Image (spheres, grey):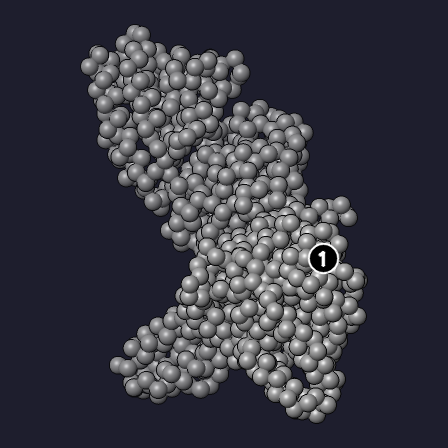
Amino acid sequence: MIQALFQEKLHVLNVGLSSFADSITRAGGSVLQIEWAPPAQGQQEVGRALARLVNLLSVETANQTAFDAYQSAQPVLNGVGTASQVLPNIAERMILHSGPPIAWKDMCGPMKGAIVGAILYEGWAENLARAEAMASSGDIVFEPCHHHNAVGPMAGIISPSMPVWMVTNTTNGNQAFSNFNEGLGKALRFGANGPDVITRLKWMGQVLAPALRASVELLGGIDLKPMMAQALHMGDEVHNRNAAASSLFLKRLISALLKTRTSAADIAGVVEFIAGNDHFFLNLSMAACKAMTDAAHGVLGSSIVTAMARNGVEFGIRVSGTGSRWFTAPAPVVDGLFFPGYSAADAAPDLGDSAITETAGVGGFAMAASPAIVKFVGGTPQDAIDNTMAMTHITVGRNNAFTLPALNFAGSPAGIDIRKVVDTSIQPIINTGIAHREAGIGQIGAGITRAPLACFTQAVSALAHSIGSSQ
Amino acid sequence: MARATKIIRNFYRDSVSLMQLSSTITKLPGVEQASAIMASPNNVTLLVEAGLLTEPVEAGANDLLIALQGNAEALESALTAAESALKQPSPSSTGNEQSRGMSPRSIEMGLGNLVGANLVLISTPGEYAAAEAFKALGLGLNVMLFSDNVELKDEIALKRFAQERDLIVMGPDCGTAIINGIPLAFANMVRRGVIGVVAASGTGLQQVTCLVDRWGSGISQAIGTGGHDLHRDVGGLSMLQGLKALAADPSTSVIVLISKPPSPEVASKVLEAASGAGKPVVVNFLGADPDRVRRENIYPAATLEDAAAAAVALANGRIPEARRASVTSPSITPLAPQQRYIRGLYSGGTFCYEASLLLKKELGQINSNTPVEPEDRLSDVWTSRKHTVIDLGDDLFTRGRPHPMIDHRLRNERLIKEASDPEVAVILLDVVLGYGSHPDPAAEMVPVIQKARDLASKAGRHLAIVGFVCGTAADPQNLSKQETAFREVGVALAESNAQAVRMAASVVQKPDVVGGRL
C-alpha cells in the first residue's frame, strides 16, 4: 500500500500544527486540517484504548450484526397488559423508575413525588406522609424500567397494577413495555401526586386500558414503525413532538374502538383524552424504540449504544457489547425555553427514559424532520438539519425506515458508536421536556440537552477491556 | 452556433442534481442545448453523439463536465451561472451534507471529507501522538509522525502494526519528508526525479535532496524514519519498509540511505536489504567505515554531500568517483595570533554532528553539546571551549522556545558572544530554507553578522564567517536570494555542510593566508 501511495495523488489529513497544512496547500498539495483536540477529555489511557478499537475488525463485524438486528426490528403494538402480569421479573412491592439504578434517598424531587403517588395509587398507604415513610422504609424495591424491558418518560414510574403498552419486535420476538401517557400539566411522571392525578390514573386503568386493549385486539396489532416514519414526514421527531403521530394513532384506533363494547360515554372520554394530548404517542414511540434497540443489545464486541436514560441525578448508557452494565455521569441541565414564571433555576436535571428515542435514531437525531422543535432553543430549521447532520458523525448507519424529507429522504442517523463519540467529542443530542425540581409542579419547559461524554469514555475503557481479555 | 465546455475536476454531484442543473442552464437566454454530467467515458460519448462535444475530452468519472451549445456571447455567462449554481449549497444535495457540515474532529471523520486520503501528518503533543497514529494505521493510512516524546515501546508497536498492513510510519520525531513531490513539515521544494531517499535524519534528508536539486537531478520520494528507527530495539523497521517501497517503485532508479551508524545487527539487516534492492543504493552512515558498508550494489558515502553527488552520478548513468575533498579556502586577511578556533553555530542537528566528525579528523578534539565522543561533551553548553560546534536545535535550547530554524534570536545572541571572543577565528553557520523554516533567514541574520564583524574589527581582529544555505530555487525563501544576501555581508558560502566545514578548517590550519576581503 506504500507502493500505491506513490502512484496516487497525495491527500493528507493534518492532525496538529495547522501551519503544516498551510505549507502543503502552498506547495500545491491536497490537505485537510482535522480540528483535533485530545480525545476522551484528555484521558490518555482511554485515548489509547480507543485507538486500538478504531476500525477493529471484530468491533466492525459486531456492530454490523447489532445494527442489522436494530434495522430489521419490526415493533408491533400487540397488547395492553397490567405491569404485574406482563413485565418480566416484577415483584409484588416493586416500583420501576426511569434511568440507571438509584436509591430512594438519592432520588430527585419529581421521582420521589411520583413514587409517593404510585404508592397512593396502589393503595399501599392512605396518605402522603405514610406513603413517603413507606418509600424510605426499604419495604419497596426500586428498580430501573430498563431492567424489565420497559421504558417510562420523566420519572418513568411503573407500579404493579398500572396498565402498560406491550410491543413485540416480530422479527426476533423480543418484547418491550411502556406506561401510558397522562398528558401535560400536573402528571405523575413530573412528580405530581394530588387527588386529581390519582383519579386520572385510576380512570386510565379502569376505562382507558380496557378500551385500548379491546381495540388493539380487534385490530390484530398495530405496526408502529410505519406510523413513526409517517409522523417524521409530518413534522414530528417522535420524542418531544408527537402531534402528528398521536393523530395518526387515534385515526387508526377509532373505528376499532367504536366496534368494542365500550360505552358511548367512555368512548367519548377515551377519544377526548387521546385527542387532548399531543404526547399520547410518546410512550408508544419509546416502547417501539426500546424493542428496536434491545434487538441490537448483547452482541459481543459491539460498540453500539442500546440505551440512554436519566434518573434526574445521573445519566446512564448501556452498550451492546458490555452487557447490563450502566456507565453513568451526573445528569446535565437542559438548555431550553421555560413556561412563564419558571427559569433554569427551577429545573430538575435531565430525567426520563425517553432518550431511548435518540438511541434508536429518532428524537434529536431526526430533528431535521421537525423544525418546530428547535424553537425551544431559539434555533432555525437550518439548525435542526445541522443537528441531525452532526449525529451522522457518531453513528454506525442510517435507518432506512426513518427517512428525512429535508435531507433528500436520507435515513435518520442511528446506532450511536461509543468510539466515534469519544474520538470526535460530539455528544449525542437529546430533545427533552424539563421537569420542576420539586415534586408535583410538573413540566416547566422543554429544550435540548446532550449526553455526557464521561459515560462514553467509561464505556470505551470497558469495551476495550472486554475485547482485550477475550482475545 | 458555438460550443463551450468546462471541466471541474474531482467534483462529484449525483445525477439528479445534474439533470436539474442541465435543465436550468438550458433555459438561460441564448443557450440552445446544455448538459452537466460526470465525465465517465459513457457520458462523454453521449455528449459527442448529441453534438455538444466535437470530440471526447480529457476527463474522468470524478470530473464534472458542463457542455453548452448556443450563441457565442451567451455561453460564457451561462458557464459562470452553472458553476455558481453548483457551488451554492442546496439542502437536498448529498455533497452539501459535507460542505455545510462541521469540520472534521477525528481522523475517521476526516476520511469522509477528504476522498482518497492516504497519509496522516501528526504533530500533536507526544503523549497523544501514538494513539492518533494507531487510529490512522487502523484505518489503512500511512503516517508521518512529527511529534516527539513518543515512547520507544509505542514506536516499536506502531511500526510492527504498520508492517503487518504494508503501511509506513515515518517517525516519531520525523521532521521532514517529500512524498509525491509534496514537502511535508520541514522540507524543501525539490525538483522531481529518479533519486529516492530514506533518512533517519531530518536535516540529512534536506541536505541530500537540496544538493540533488542543486546539481540538476531530482527526487522521486524522500522518506523520513525518525531518529530512533535504527535503534537496536526498533530494528530499522521504517527504513526497511521505505527501502522496499523504493525498490519496487518504477519511478526510482537510485536509492540513498542516511543515518547515524546503526548497531551492527541493524546495519547488516539494512545493508543486506539494500544490496538486494535491485537498484544502486548509496549509503551514508555518518562516520561509519566505508569498508564495513560496502556490498554488492552499495556505494558508501562519507558525507551527505558525497551521498548526493554519488546519487546524481548514478542517476546520470555514471559510476560515482571517489570524490577528492576539494577545499576552497576563503581568501582571508591575517588572523591575530590568538585567533585559533572554530565556533560552529548550527540549527541542524545532523549538520552539527557531521561537522564534529569532519573537524575531528583535521583538528582533534571538537567540543559540542552533541559530541561524537562522550569526553568531548561541553560541561556548560552556553560557553564554548576551543573548537566548539553547537546544535542549537538540541532540547536544551528549544525548551519553551521555537526551533532555531524558525526563531533566530538565540543563535544571533550566541554569534555576538563568539565574535567577542578573541580566540575565535571562524564562525561556521548553517541556514536551512524550505517550508516550515523562517520565511527570510537572511533578514534575521545579516544585520547580526554585520554587527559581529564590526565588533571584531573594532577590537583589531578579522573574523571569518563561513556558511552554507540548504535550500532550493523553488523554496519559498528562494535559494539564490538568500545566498546573495549572505555573500553581500561577506559570508564565505559553500554549497554544502561538508564544504563549509573544510573551508572553516582551512582557515585555522592556514592562519597566515593573505588574501582579499574576508
Report the number of discs.
1
Q: Dot 1 corresponds to which residue?
A: A143
Q: Kindly identify the residue that appears in the image at 73 percent across and 84 percent down.
A: A214
B341 w.r.t. A413: above or below: above
Can residue B131 be seen from the camera position used here? yes
- Kindly give the residue lying farthest to the top in the view shown: B337
Q: Name the residue: 69% across, 48% down.
A: A462
Locate residue B333 relative to residue B11 in the image: left or right. left
- Classify residue A403 as left or right of residue A264: left
Which residue occupies the foreground of this view, B256 or B154?
B154
Find the residue positioned furthest to the left: B458
Residue shown at 28%/12% (left/top)? B335
Comparing A283 with A200, the one in front is A200
The type of residue carrying mark 1 is Glu
- Quarter occupied by residue A208: bottom right
Circle 1 Cα neighbour tier, 10 Å, few/some/many (<14 / 14–19 / ≥20) = many
Visible in this render: residue B243? no
Q: Position of residue A36 (x, y in %)?
A: 49, 49
SS at circle 1: strand
Q: Is residue B18 found left or right of A74 in the rendered image?
A: left
Give the residue displayed 51% in from the left and 77% down from the top: A235
Q: Is residue A428 above or below residue A234?
A: above
Percent position (x, y) of residue A240?
54, 70
Residue B238 location in percent, x, y?
Answer: 60, 40
Q: Which of A325 and A383 is in front in this view?
A: A325
Chain bearing mark 1? A
Where is residue B435, by image quadrant?
top left
Q: Nearer the viewer, residue B141 or B371?
A: B141
Q: In this view, does B75 lie to the left or right of A376?
A: left
* Percent x, y of residue A118: 67, 64
